[in-house]
Image (cartoon, rainbow, N blue to C red):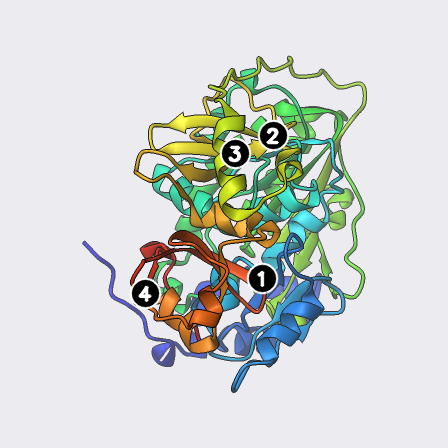
Amino acid sequence: MSRPRVDRSTVCRADLEQVLGRYRPLFDSVTSDWDAFVDTLLRPLPGCVWANPLRIDAEGLTALAADEPNGPRLEPIPWLPGALRLPAALKAGQRWWYCAGLAHAQELVSQLPVRLMDLAPGQRVLDLCAAPGGKTAQIALALGNRGTLLANDFSPERIAALQGNLDRVGVVNCSTTWCDGGNYPVAAGGFDRILVDAPCSSEGTLRRNISLVARLGPDRVHRMAGRQRALLRKAVQLCRPGGRIIYSTCTFAPEENELIVAEVLEAQAGRLRLLPTELPGLVTGPGVTRWGDQQLDPSLARCLRIWPHVNDTGGFFIAVLEKSADAPAPPPAEPLVTDETDSPDWLHGLGERYGLDERVWADYRLHRQTRRGLHLVAADHRPPALPKPQGSGLFFHRTNIRPPKLTTAGALLVGAQATRNHIELSAAQRDSYLRREEIRPTPAQTGECTPGQVLVRYRGHTLGVAVLHRSGTLESLFPRRWSCSGA
């Protein structure tokens, strides 16, 4: 039976007071101004994107967005490099620069856990609860889009959505796995960094999803705790000695936050410690050290709480944990054996068509993952045999059709290096292309192209693949599931 939809205009202070009132004692210890807290939750959350560093920086994205008729002004966030606030009511997914993978929409506070992972190229990393993939993409790019990142989720549908986001922004150093994170196999090997962005009661997302108010309450909170505990315990087991674990939620409940961390710390008997953390420029609150009649270890104050009314954000909790250097190490992983393909033949054909220098492929491996075609993966990516990956790298070249076709994700990845058979579109043509409409380019636009598949660009940024027919019309091959208004 479906739940009734709750409209924002029907939710009032009394509703929030009723479901969140048990947190009022915290406003005498770890934060202040209960009235401002409730008022903020009744206001919609400002949108936020980050610029994809593989393709553009925040300054460039800001200028690109503003240089459109009635273009939006994206506001830099001084304490979060690369992130930009959106104007009210702007839907990033309907903008051409989003469809082209120049940006990814992600709530501001959701970007913070990855910032505290202390990531560096060469680390082996696990995102244990990865969908919808914003944090996974952040991790992948912080690793330089190289090495080994595993992104896990418990739902195949969520993994499909996750993979779509990774493909759009050009991630090639990640394998996805479908597994209950609390039972993730030790055969996966050890990891230098693990993110546990745990499923939770989601109280901190009320500004985005006010209808959630009808489902909140202590029962929902307590249902989550067992799963959260299992996820954090598994992360400790899989973490290498000296490694770091980030545990985060988007809820206010101590039962899902400090109490989970406290229990796991106690079980580890000194082999795990909370690190002091800060996010310069962001006002954060300390972790809770007393809840009801429970007195917790004073070190739990090192946890971070982000309160919505203090920074005009959603609500969030983050704990940064370090495993001691003398703790037991997980066993090494058995590497997955992939079906390598005759890469030079396929890549030679693409190089000839689009004028791609052979050095473009130096940092990649090509392998056949499905009958549909070929995936491109970072050359040094080494996923384990177990759990068996659902996917590795980026679906790059569709070979089960004639003629074979570079995928849109593949086009976005290498299109900037193409020196022939590419067409620069006008703004009106760009919008038609993104709506999958037929286009009639001018002879000047197609003068350097031969009939067949071509890359299309707008302002120098690749949008995807089209077919230039001998009649002179251009047929859009932009994916239906990515389609947007192009505005």
Q: Amino acid at mark 1?
A: Gly
Give the quarter of the figure containing the N terminus: bottom left
Between marks 2 and 1, how big is the CA–CA gap?
A: 23 Å
- Tag 2 residue: 235
Assess whether mark 4 and mark 1 are in contact (beta carbons under 8 angstroms): no
- Tag 1 residue: 315
Query: Percent position (x, y) of residue 485?
Result: 38, 71
Is 483 on the left-hand or right-hand side of 170? left
Query: Percent position (x, y) of residue 342?
Result: 49, 22
Q: Amino acid at mark 2?
A: Ala
Assess whether mark 3 and mark 1 are in contact (beta carbons under 8 angstroms): no
**Mark toward the viewer: 1 or 3:** 3
Q: Amino acid at mark 3?
A: Leu
- Tag 3 residue: 347
**Mark toward the viewer: 4 or 3:** 4
Please report the residue visible at 47 percent of the width from the left and 76 percent of the height from the top.
427
Please report the residue visible at 56 percent of the width from the left and 80 percent of the height from the top.
72
Q: Amino acid at mark 4?
A: Thr
Q: Nearer the viewer, residue 200 or 196?
A: 196
Identify the secondary structure beneath mark 3. helix
Between marks 1 and 4, how big is the CA–CA gap?
A: 50 Å
Is 275 on the left-hand or right-hand side of 378? right
> Sequence order check: which comes first, mark 4 or mark 3?
3
- Please tell me the numbered disc located at residue 473: 4
Between marks 1 and 3, how big is the CA–CA gap?
A: 47 Å
Please report the residue visible at 46 percent of the width from the left and 19 percent of the height from the top.
339
